[in-house]
Image (cartoon, rainbow, N blue to C red):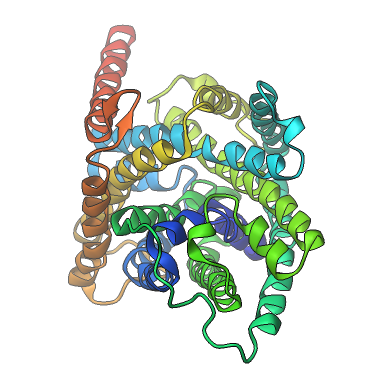
């Protein structure tokens, strides 16, 4: 995978276009939503990108973040890192087939009525599995094409909105939202800006990873911020009320600003968003069981590959697990996903600091400035934001349980599984 496919794949692993931002508007209004989206890159995306840039260039191993934590903190925490990431993926990956169906419903509701919606979701899972079996290079190259198709309607939308707005004041920009939920808006913003470490799990399949990972992180970070902020700003200037925004409302914005043709293009883009995000994320997550099998933390069967180098057993196993979560709702998925992902992300920042102390001579083609103090400081704001996300989810329910209690149960299950695997390995040694 070369530089541009890596950028496109990273972009989809993090954002996949402006889709998914609508709820921030409904919760915060335009001004506060734009402020949240402008500030979070500096407090959340940039520190994470710096951490990923250093560790991915220093340790470009298949398995990425799992390998970093294993190397820095040992087997137990390496297993926990992998477990939390895979557990988070169960809830994260169910979101994208749901978005595909949501946008399909906008143009052809009869195709998604009843059980048909679930069949479409399963179709996304199966189709992306077959796609991934062709290997990381194919997934990366296709992400470039999907990136262009996805953003084309928004280029037109931005142009039409600016033309409509010209000389007509501030539009809806300063209008307050009818309902305000700033903690919820920040949580959705964090979810829309997370996932910078996902691309690192395919490091051995990337061309010149020591050079390309830091460049890809920073390029993708700029692209994500621009494609979030610019469409929201111009739609606000064009006068669309914030309270009309909920998941899927970009279609209404396109229809209001330009007409039915652009609305249809945005619908197609929303469907591309669902597939475009699911596909490279499947590539990413499937490499974690593969790397664990290399370290004998999982059965050796997970190391089996296709001729193109795709870990086919891991891909099929992940797809089967993700299919089980397809019935969860969008809001519940975001809350538990943030809590679980936050735990794994904090372990990566800890690994960054530990490796600075334990392996000071490790070659680091890209190095966070400021020495050991810089490595510690870069994780402060992400840690605070993870704590905030946990606080914001304190009243959320998952499967009838408090979201935080549910997350603790998931983490405890990882520790139990690690102990059982170690016990089994000792018995069979």
- In the image, residue 419 above or below residue 208: above
- In the image, residue 176 above or below residue 9: below
Residue at the image point whose x is 53% and y is 75% from the top: 233
Residue at the image point whose x is 29% and y is 37% from the top: 396
Q: Residue furthest bottom?
A: 167
- Pinpoint residue 378: horizontal percent, then vertical percent: 26, 67
Question: Relative to residue 218, is residue 395 drawn left or right?
Answer: left
Image quarter of residue 130: top right
For the N terminus, give its image quadrant: bottom right
Question: Relative to residue 231, is residue 294 drawn left or right?
Answer: left
Residue at the image point whose x is 49% and y is 21% from the top: 300
- Pinpoint residue 93: horizontal percent, then vertical percent: 52, 37
Image quarter of residue 373: bottom left
Q: Is residue 56 visible?
A: no
The residue lying toward the viewer, choosing from 369 and 112, is 112
- Pinpoint residue 370: horizontal percent, then vertical percent: 23, 76
Residue at the image point whose x is 68% and y is 24% from the top: 119
For the C terminus, give its image quadrant: top left
The residue lying toward the viewer, choosing from 385 and 203, is 385
């Amino acid at each position: 995978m070369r530089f541009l496919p890596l950028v496109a794949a990273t972009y989809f692993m993090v954002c996949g276009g402006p889709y998914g931002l609508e709820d921030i508007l409904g919760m915060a209004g335009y001004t506060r939503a734009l402020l949240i989206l402008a500030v979070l890159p500096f407090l959340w995306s940039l520190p994470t990108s710096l951490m990923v840039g250093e560790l991915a260039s220093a340790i470009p191993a298949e398995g990425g973040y799992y390998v970093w934590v294993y190397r820095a903190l040992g087997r137990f925490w390496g297993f926990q890192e992998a477990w939390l990431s895979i557990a988070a993926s169960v809830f994260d990956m169910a979101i994208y087939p749901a978005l595909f169906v949501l946008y399909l419903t906008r143009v052809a509701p009869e195709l998604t009525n009843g059980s048909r919606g679930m069949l479409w979701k399963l179709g996304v899972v199966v189709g992306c599995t077959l796609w991934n079996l062709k290997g990381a290079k194919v997934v990366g190259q296709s992400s470039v094409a999907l990136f262009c198709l996805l953003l084309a309607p928004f280029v037109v939308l931005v142009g039409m909105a600016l033309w409509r707005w010209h000389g007509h004041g501030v539009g809806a920009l300063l209008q307050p939202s009818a309902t305000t939920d700033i903690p919820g808006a920040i949580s959705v913003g964090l979810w829309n800006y997370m996932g910078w470490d996902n691309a690192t799990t395919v490091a051995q399949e990337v061309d010149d990873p020591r050079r390309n990972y830091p460049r890809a992180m920073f390029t993708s970070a700029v692209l994500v911020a621009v494609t979030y902020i610019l469409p929201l700003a111009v739609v606000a200037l064009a006068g669309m009320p914030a309270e009309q925004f909920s998941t899927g409302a970009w279609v209404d914005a396109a229809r209001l600003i330009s007409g039915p043709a652009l609305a249809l293009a945005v619908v197609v883009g929303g469907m591309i968003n669902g597939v475009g995000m699911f596909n490279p994320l499947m590539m990413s997550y499937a490499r974690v069981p593969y790397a664990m099998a290399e370290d004998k933390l999982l059965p050796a069967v997970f190391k089996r590959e296709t001729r193109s180098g795709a870990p086919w057993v891991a891909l099929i196993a992940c797809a089967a697990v993700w299919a089980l979560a397809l019935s969860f709702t969008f809001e519940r998925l975001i809350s538990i996903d943030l809590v679980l992902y936050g735990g794994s992300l904090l372990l990566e920042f800890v690994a960054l600091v530990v490796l600075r102390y334990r392996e000071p001579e490790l070659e680091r083609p890209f190095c966070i400035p400021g020495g050991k103090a810089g490595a510690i400081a870069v994780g402060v704001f992400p840690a605070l934001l993870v704590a905030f996300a946990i606080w914001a989810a304190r009243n959320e329910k998952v499967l009838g349980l408090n979201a935080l209690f549910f997350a603790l149960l998931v983490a405890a299950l990882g520790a139990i599984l690690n102990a059982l695997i170690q016990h089994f390995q000792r018995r069979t040694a």
